[in-house]
């Protein structure tokens, strides 16, 4: 043994450790193992001859309070169904897509999962989720026409449905009526067009770019950027030709509106004000602190406001649009999918269908989200005050389901969102013209899209 | 550098099959390190090999990989502007954060080496930030760097300086992350402290008798004898700086204007958000080569400035 004894000096130790650490840098960046082809893993295959009940696994990304609401729904289902039992696993919101990706590629996914609805097409294109058409055709309950087209349409790729919508959320404009009154504006005459927003913003804003702003009327960016194009009458994507259509007169006009605020009030100063204010929908939300008079907010914000700023006087209207355009909004939410390789797709679909119809009806009152089905808009969240004012606000959001867009249904969706965000940044900070910023985002995304579609 | 270890057995290095007795003896040894070897193969060698393979493919993870040769590397070096942006950001960060945190850690370690009352309290205090989970620390830092109400800008305002907009500005976002990296110097400080305590007292005494003042003792006794520890921390620190991820993921998401798009975060985006795992693997491999080059350069240079007390002069 003594012959093989090495002379591990301190120097050699330090050097070797450094090399190993460098090596682990590479190892840490490696994806999961390659897809194991063929047979499905035996994870949920508890259905042997002896027992009549089947147990399926379900992954959800809601945690904490919302995780408990999900668990209630599952418990309810389990209590009322003998043949099928559901085991729910909470995979934190930021992790679910990553974990599902590796689980599917390893051939070991859950029977059923919920993912962001915007991601469905990205998964579908790459074969990560199953087409549901055969199940839907055979189902007595699930009928695509019962859902708002904007919600169902986001789950469709090349004519096939790859998911069923769960909850929805739309955007509307919030106006701080007290700040309007303080500035000598009539709180009963709230803006419906961009020009009216501009005038109100000018009247309300106090402070300047050098010393900072105490109060700001409106900042057009920082909410969902894609709303701007739609509200100017533009489209970001053409499904027919699978082309990104960022550079259009309407979208350029929308980005010029962004530039107008950056020029007038100082892009960096507004940015400082906006980010300086802390996260949206917390106690430090500038709207809740009477520091911004107009903001575009999602339906879920109503319950946050009730919790954090019940005394702030406000009103909710459809989003203001550019002269010549029309009402618009976005509908975003989550969707129920069967991951490819789902060990028990039939029973899993049974639960999927139930979740997207009955489960969501139990979810909405607790979680203060919106429904996705036309016959469920009467459901009202428990967390909101049950009065005419809030029921009116809720209706404003629900009405938007009929005219809202969904995110571009394309496999490079996430890439596109990042590009559009960078384009707006560049305009706000004065680095690119609206045309140039949109052109760059369009070119980069189209390349990525063509690649994903196998065209490049 | 490895010649020291190799030169000794060189004379006897002739190929000869082991005898049965030797074989049995060796087998015990092999069995003892077999679990480690298995782990190394399974969790290091195989993934690294797989990453090398995937880097030559288009691979969405969900679909089978498609061989595209050097396509990913071509894209990276000649097409993808964000790759260069990420390289620039990461080098910028590493160039400032590594020397800065190392010098401050040396300073702190030197202070902590004095036998003053409450020493263990101070040592604990400086180490404490390192046991705060990075997620929690990042959230707190987002507040410390808050342009209006943040601790740092508040202090600056008290002395009459305008506070920079930190994370909202393209110019200040990287300095913000460099500042943040100082939060985590506890482990470095402790390792340096251990190195300091290894320095024999008699050298200081000798220097003192020769009339060296505090600074001279530090410069000519402490620093040279601390170089092996400094070298170790430099290499580890550099590797860590190149792999900055969690803070970016939590605080800045790469913005504004890609100014905090650091390399590993970009790699994560490509692999897990854009479904470009082949490209991400290529990015990983390039990062590996970059780190390897830096490490080799440091090692070669270490011959000139690192002093190993026990090593024989060559």
Image: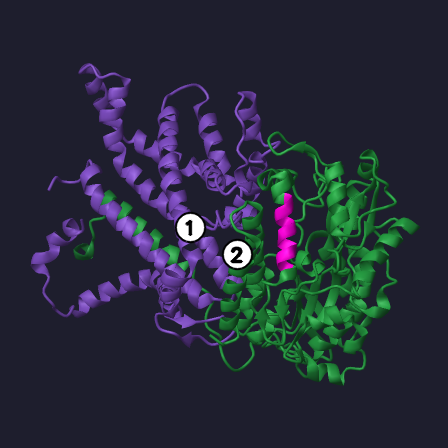
**Of A28 and A7, which appears nearest the observer?**
A28
Quarter containing the N terminus of chain A: bottom left
Between disc 1 and disc 2, the foreground one is: 2
The vertical placement of B110 against A337, above or below, is above
Pointer 1 residue = B243
**Chain A is which colour?**
green
**Of A386 and A344, which appears nearest the observer?**
A386
**Chain B is which colour?**
purple
How many other residues sit within 10 Å of disc 2, few (<14), some (14-19) or many (≥20)? some
Q: Considering the numbered disc 2 on the image, is that residue within a helix, a strand or a loop?
A: helix
Name the chain letter of the residue that bears numbered label 1: B
* Magenta range: A251-261
Q: Are marks 1 and 2 on the same chain?
A: no
Residue A253 part of the magenta segment: yes
Pointer 2 residue = A436
**Of B156 and B102, which appears nearest the observer?**
B156
Magenta: main secondary structure equals helix
Q: Position of residue B48 (x, y in %)?
A: 37, 64
Identify the residue at horizontal 36%, vertical 61% (top origin). Answer: B77
Report if residue A287 is visible in the image: no
Do tag 1 and tag 2 residues touch (Cβ < 8 Å)? no
Identify the residue at horizontal 40%, vertical 46% (top origin). Answer: B241
Residue B130 vs residue B306: left or right?
Answer: right
The vertical placement of A106 against A8, above or below, is below
Q: Residue furthest right?
A: A388
Separation (CA) of disc 1 from disc 2: 33 Å
Q: Quadrant of residue A356?
A: bottom right
Residue A47 vs residue B99: left or right?
Answer: right
């Amino acid at each position: 043994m003594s012959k093989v004894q090495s002379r591990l000096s301190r120097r050699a130790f330090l050097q070797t450790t450094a090399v190993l650490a460098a090596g682990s840098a590479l190892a840490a960046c490696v994806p999961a193992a390659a897809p194991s082809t063929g047979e499905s893993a035996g994870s949920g295959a508890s259905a042997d001859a002896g027992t009549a009940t089947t147990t399926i696994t379900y992954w959800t990304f809601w945690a904490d309070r919302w995780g408990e609401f999900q668990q209630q729904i599952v418990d309810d289902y389990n209590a009322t169904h003998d043949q099928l039992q559901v085991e729910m696993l909470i995979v934190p919101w930021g992790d679910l897509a990553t974990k599902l990706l590796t689980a599917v590629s390893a051939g070991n996914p859950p029977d059923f999962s919920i993912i962001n609805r915007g991601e469905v097409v990205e998964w579908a294109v790459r074969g990560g989720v199953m087409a549901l058409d055969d199940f839907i055709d055979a189902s007595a309950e699930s009928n695509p026409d019962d859902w708002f087209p904007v919600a169902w349409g986001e789950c469709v790729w090349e004519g096939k449905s790859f998911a069923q919508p769960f909850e929805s959320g739309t955007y509307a404009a919030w106006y701080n009526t007290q700040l309007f009154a303080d500035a000598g504006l009539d709180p009963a005459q709230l803006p419906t067009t961009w020009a009216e927003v501009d005038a109100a913003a000018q009247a309300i804003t106090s402070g300047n770019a050098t010393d900072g702003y105490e109060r700001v009327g409106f900042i057009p960016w920082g909410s969902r950027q894609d709303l701007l194009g739609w509200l100017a009458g533009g489209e970001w994507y053409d499904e027919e030709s699978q082309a990104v259509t960022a550079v259009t007169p309407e979208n350029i006009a929308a980005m010029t509106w962004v530039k107008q605020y950056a020029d007038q009030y100082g892009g960096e100063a507004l940015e400082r004000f906006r980010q300086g204010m802390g996260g949206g929908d917390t106690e430090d939300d500038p709207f809740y602190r009477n520091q911004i008079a107009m903001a575009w907010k999602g339906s879920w914000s109503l319950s946050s406001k009730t919790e954090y700023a019940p005394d702030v006087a406000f009103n909710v209207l459809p989003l203001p649009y550019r002269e010549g355009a029309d009402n618009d909004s976005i509908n975003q939410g989550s969707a129920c999918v069967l991951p490819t390789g789902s060990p028990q797709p039939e029973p899993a679909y049974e639960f999927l269908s139930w979740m997207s119809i009955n489960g969501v009806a139990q979810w909405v009152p607790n979680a203060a989200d919106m429904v996705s089905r036309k016959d469920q808009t009467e459901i009202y969240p428990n967390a909101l005050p049950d009065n005419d004012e809030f029921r009116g606000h809720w209706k404003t959001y629900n009405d938007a389901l009929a005219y809202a867009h969904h995110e571009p249904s394309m496999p490079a969706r996430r890439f596109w969102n990042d590009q559009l965000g960078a384009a707006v940044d560049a305009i706000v900070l004065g680095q690119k013209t609206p045309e140039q910023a949109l052109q760059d985002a369009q070119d980069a995304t189209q390349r990525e899209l063509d690649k994903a579609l196998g065209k490049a | 550098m490895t010649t020291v270890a190799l030169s000794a057995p060189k004379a006897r290095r002739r190929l000869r099959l082991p005898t049965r007795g030797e074989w049995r003896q060796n087998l015990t040894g092999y069995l003892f390190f077999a679990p480690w070897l298995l782990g190394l193969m399974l969790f290091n060698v195989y993934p690294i090999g797989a990453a090398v393979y995937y880097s030559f493919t288009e691979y969405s993870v969900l679909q089978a990989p498609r061989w595209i040769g050097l396509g990913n590397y071509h894209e990276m070096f000649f097409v993808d502007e964000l790759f260069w942006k990420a390289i620039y950001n990461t080098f910028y960060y590493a160039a400032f954060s590594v020397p800065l945190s190392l010098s401050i850690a040396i300073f702190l370690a030197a202070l902590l080496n004095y036998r003053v009352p409450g020493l263990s309290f101070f040592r604990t205090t400086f180490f404490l930030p390192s046991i705060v989970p990075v997620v929690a620390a990042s959230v707190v830092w987002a507040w410390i760097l808050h342009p209006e109400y943040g601790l740092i800008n508040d202090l600056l305002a008290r002395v009459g300086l305008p506070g920079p907009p930190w994370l909202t500005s393209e110019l200040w976002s990287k300095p913000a992350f460099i500042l943040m990296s100082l939060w985590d110097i506890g482990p470095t400080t402790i390792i340096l402290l251990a190195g300091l305590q290894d320095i024999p007292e008699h050298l200081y005494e000798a220097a003192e008798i020769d009339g060296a003042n505090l600074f001279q003792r530090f410069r000519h006794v402490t620093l040279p004898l601390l170089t092996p520890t400094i070298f170790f921390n430099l290499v580890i620190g550099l590797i860590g700086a190149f792999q900055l991820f969690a803070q970016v993921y939590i605080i800045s998401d790469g913005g504004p204007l890609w100014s905090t798009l650091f390399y590993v975060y970009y790699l994560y985006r490509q692999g897990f958000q854009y479904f470009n795992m082949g490209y991400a693997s290529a990015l990983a491999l390039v990062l590996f080569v970059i780190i390897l080059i830096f490490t080799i350069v440091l090692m070669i240079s270490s011959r000139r400035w690192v002093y190993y007390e026990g090593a024989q002069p060559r």
